[in-house]
Amino acid sequence: MLTATVDLTDPQLWARPDVGTIVAELRQRGPVQRTNTAEDGPVWSVLTYALGAEVLTDAATYSSVGGSLLGSGEGTTPAGAGKMMALTDPPRHRELRAPVLPYFSPRGVRGSAERIADLADTVIAEAVERGEVDLVDVLAQVPLAVMCDLLGIPAEDRDLVVSVCDEAFLARTPQGRRGGHQKLLPYLLGQVMQRRMQPADDLISTLATHRIGGKLLPIEDVVLNLDNIVVGGVQTVRHTAAMSIWALLQHPDCWRRLQAGEVALDTAIDELLRFTSVGLHVLRTATRQVELGDQVIEAGEKVAVWTWSADHDPAMFDRPDELLLERTPNRHLALGVGVHYCVGAPLAKAELGAIYAALLDQVGEIELTGEPVHNSSIINFGFDHLPVRLTARSAVGRTGDKFLLKG
Ligand code: HEM
């Protein structure tokens, strides 16, 4: 049995400038290795793209019911197991995913494109006016407002929802994260009870009145699935956007080319998703004894697919550690693959596109004003703080050659 020499569950590892080299060396030692994690006990780490995709596209052998993310604690079953979309296997999984799909389909998202673009323009315009901002806070406002729109969350509750989301995903201990969910769940429960009585045209009402085999979905399952969508939909976009801006700070030429219109934004969005892969990993549990690469995995053992490592695998991506905005094809795993492929992917891309377009259009200069502070999470790896000064593009000049991005 090959045991990993590096603890991939250490968030400090992912903040290191030489993380690419460390992970590449580990991947070269073997595509599947045993990692002894502090929180979840022994876990199989899958490091290559081919084997990562093999795991994620075989839901019968690699189940999501025992958890889809590390960090819930050894031997602990997550609260939503078998009830929450991300924590179910087919056929139950399909029954939970089908009702929410229209909200996130490319067609559904196109209907909101104008609203998302306006929102991003307003959020960035306000930030530019303030000048010195924490980009992590600024960027969260877009997915949060979009999510609240989708769910039909009243305006006065929106700040509460974002602070609780932060706690639920980014608290340093499993207990802290559970505490965050314990605050979000009663809030969502109240909203679900209201919509069962008086349904409106929103996602909460759709799930609150959803029937499977003629029976209403139990209230608890409705709440858990909403929790899954809220938390999954806000933090991922926020951290992908912040890490992408950080990546562009290191590659000023990429930003200049984007601003000059030399690269299609859609293509660049996928490359930034691949390059940052903020989710870092996805977890499964083996349902039977199975051979994976050169290792034998026993039924009940945990298998973590390190999506960041897969997305930087040279066997799949040419020059994987370079940010090549025109990269096509770009079949990265940042949004997953298989039946659990991110249901919010079209929405996430629309939000990221709107944020980048607003920044490209309005911002002439981004300058760091302090040390960025990485968060301590291997669920959504990113920053707690990214302090910057934004200078209006009009003040710097609107031609590509005058654009400046300072790190
Ligand atoms: C850049 C932003 C995003 C990233 C990087 C991301 C990443 C992912 C990944 C890797 C998965 C697969 C998990 C697995 O295989 O177990 C996933 C699933 C999921 N995502 Fe996203 N996501 C993003 C945005 C969103 C948004 C905007 C929403 C909702 C509004 C969302 C909701 C979900 C849900 C509900 C699932 C579970 C789907 C299922 O089990 O069928 N995500 N996401």
Image (cartoon, helix red, strand yellow):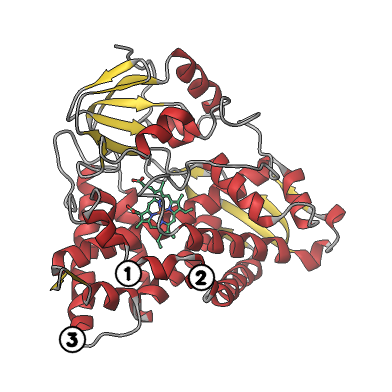
Which of the image's four quarters has the C terminus?
top right
Q: CA distance from mark 2 to mark 1?
A: 30 Å
Q: Which labelled disc corresponds to residue 160?
A: 1
Q: Earlier in the sequence, mark 3 or mark 2?
A: 2
Q: Is residue 201 left or right of residue 394?
A: left
Q: Is residue 90 left or right of residue 24?
A: left
Number of numbered tags placed on the structure image: 3
Q: Nearer the viewer, mark 3 or mark 2?
A: 2
The location of residue 364, given as percent across then percent down, is 75, 59
Asked if marks 2 and 1 touch (Cβ < 8 Å), the reply is no
The location of residue 115, given as percent across then percent down, is 55, 77
Residue picked out by circle 3: 197
376 relative to 341, above or below: above
Q: CA distance from mark 3 to mark 1?
A: 24 Å
Query: 223 and 6: which one is in front?
Result: 223
Query: 9 and 54: which one is in front?
Result: 54
Query: 149 and 401: which one is in front?
Result: 149
Which residue is drawn at the image coordinates 44% and 36% (left, top)? 307
- Residue type at mark 3: give it: Met
Which residue ends up furthest to the bottom in the rendered image?
A: 198
323 relative to 298, above or below: below
Asked if marks 3 and 2 touch (Cβ < 8 Å), the reply is no
Q: SS of the residue at dot 1? A: helix
Q: Earlier in the sequence, mark 2 or mark 1?
A: 2
- Residue type at mark 2: give it: Arg
72 relative to 97, above or below: above
Q: Nearer the viewer, mark 2 or mark 1?
A: 2
Which residue is drawn at the image coordinates 20% and 23% (left, top)? 298
Q: Toward which corner of the image does residue 250 lie, by quadrant?
A: top right
